[in-house]
Image (cartoon, rainbow, N blue to C red):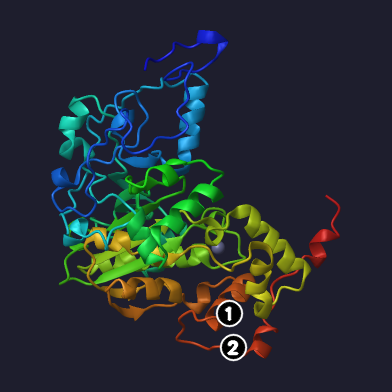
């Protein structure tokens, strides 16, 4: 298969072949010769690299379905279609290696403990150098770097004397904070994912195939391939303090697991508690690290309970027009999405196993779903810390009180249905009348 130069056959972009499209493959075909991938092997060489690229050098050796980059795979396709990126482009990974070498954990070699990420995904250019030297398109699915960050709430806490500059973690009174962070793309070991959900692998594969518009026919035709890189967002780990402390069971750990809420996290909409709880999580993580422990915040790209912002805003409208009370909070989402939540925390604890977290001293989350998922994976949670009352925005009482009533952890009051019907959000009355 040869790349076509741009403009060949009057078409823009580059293609592996101008006359033949491979719709799918089957085991045993002469063009199918996958490099073995033994998921759960503790030795990375015995485990083998994850190969998903359709570059000419790699396509016959693929041992995974899908594409790199999560949802950004679509932009990669656009770049190739537009002729900006050659079909057979191979990246250079010079100087991209991690800023911290996470010590290998027993879970990296346990195919029941890590099913939704590649435990060797950060070390690809070192571990699989021989394959890279052979011209194969092996790519990292994890990247580890360092940054200095500044949050307004942290700056405010420093000003108020609730937090101190220590010179290592908090490095200025303006609120500059040092952090080690790791970005992780999803890599699913399908038998393990199916097991977490208590379903059979065949049903999972068929539903993924059908509900993604028939995008990945090899989910059906290649049962020998067990690994799938799904077109979804991943996660980012933020570590405060020395990263080697995270896996040390002898130091305390404060942890927040946060699911994306762009409207609040970034733009500080006051309809929910996401940004205040996230900032509180960061501050508590910093304090734990300053006290000699470790602080970790993990940010999952699961916007709007993994329903997306369009559904979320439809729900906002239904809430505000229908009388926004806490007793109807979940029903508004269920009417539109069919479920109240699609975040499915079952895969979330993989990152904790990868980091080598053995217990959580302070869990900065009230979610019963997160609590259950983590403890079911054998990681005890010693103390749960609810969001402090004084940082809950007034309009978000509807959300937080409905969640508490539905099983979220609280050290405070649980409401009756009658009381919930009286917890009301801000209306639009004085807004819709305004002529813009
Ligand atoms: Zn939110």
Q: Nearer the viewer, residue 92 or 148?
A: 92
Please rate how many residues cluster around mark 2, counting C-alpha atoms within 10 Å: few if below 14, some from 14 to 19, many from 20: some
Q: In this orientation, does residue 436 appear? A: yes
Q: Nearer the viewer, residue 376 or 261?
A: 376
Label 1 element class: helix
Q: Is residue 347 left or right of residue 104?
A: right
Residue 316 position (above or below residue 371): above
Task: Determine which of the numbered discs, if any, sits on residue 401 in the image.
Answer: 1
Residue where numbered disc 2 is placed: 415
Q: Where in the figure is residue 64, as x and y percent of width and height?
A: 34, 42
Q: Is residue 420 left or right of residue 362?
A: right
Residue 258 position (above or below residue 25): below
Q: Is residue 13 left or right of residue 112?
A: right
Give whichever of discs 2 and 1 has the lower sequence position: 1
Please rate how many residues cluster around mark 1, counting C-alpha atoms within 10 Å: few if below 14, some from 14 to 19, many from 20: many
Q: Is mark 1 within 8 Å of ligand 1?
A: no
């Amino acid at each position: 298969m040869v790349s076509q130069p741009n403009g060949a056959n009057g078409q823009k972009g580059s293609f592996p072949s101008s006359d033949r499209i491979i719709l799918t493959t089957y085991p045993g075909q002469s063009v199918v010769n996958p490099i073995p991938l033994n998921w759960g092997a503790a030795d990375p060489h015995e485990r083998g690299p994850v190969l998903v690229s359709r570059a000419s050098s790699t396509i016959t050796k693929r041992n995974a379905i899908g594409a790199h980059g999560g949802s950004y795979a679509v932009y990669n396709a656009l770049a190739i279609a537009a002729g900006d990126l050659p079909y057979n482009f191979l990246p250079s990974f010079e100087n991209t290696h991690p800023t911290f070498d996470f010590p290998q954990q027993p879970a990296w070699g346990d195919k029941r403990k890590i099913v939704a990420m590649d435990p060797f995904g950060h070390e690809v250019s070192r571990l699989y150098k021989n394959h890279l030297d052979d011209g194969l398109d092996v790519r990292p699915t994890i990247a580890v770097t360092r940054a200095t960050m500044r949050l307004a709430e942290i700056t405010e806490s420093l000003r108020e004397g609730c937090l101190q500059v220590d010179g290592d973690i908090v490095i200025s009174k303006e609120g500059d904070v040092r952090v080690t962070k790791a970005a992780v793309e999803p890599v699913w070991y399908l038998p393990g994912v199916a097991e977490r959900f208590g379903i059979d692998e065949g049903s999972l594969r068929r539903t993924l195939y059908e509900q993604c518009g028939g995008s990945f026919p090899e989910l059906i035709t290649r049962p020998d391939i067990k690994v799938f890189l799904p077109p979804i967002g991943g996660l980012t780990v933020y570590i405060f303090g020395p990263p080697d402390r995270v896996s040390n069971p002898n130091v305390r750990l404060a942890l927040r697991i946060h699911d994306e809420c762009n409207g609040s996290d970034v733009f500080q909409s006051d309809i929910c508690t996401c940004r205040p709880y996230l900032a509180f999580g960061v501050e508590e993580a910093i304090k734990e690290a300053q006290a000699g422990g470790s602080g970790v915040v993990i940010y999952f790209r699961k916007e709007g309970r993994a329903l997306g912002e369009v559904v979320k805003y439809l729900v906002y409208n239904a809430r505000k027009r229908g009388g926004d009370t806490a007793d109807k909070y979940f029903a508004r989402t269920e009417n539109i999405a069919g479920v109240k939540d699609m975040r499915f925390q079952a895969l979330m604890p993989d990152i904790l196993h990868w980091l080598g977290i053995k217990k959580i001293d302070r869990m900065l989350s009230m979610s019963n779903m997160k609590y259950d998922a983590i403890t079911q994976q054998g990681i005890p949670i010693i103390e749960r810390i609810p969001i402090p009352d004084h940082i809950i925005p007034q309009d978000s009482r509807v959300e937080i009180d409905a969640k508490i009533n539905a099983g979220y952890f609280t050290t405070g009051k649980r409401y009756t249905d009658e009381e919930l019907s009286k917890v009301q959000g801000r209306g639009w009355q004085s807004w819709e009348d305004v002529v813009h």
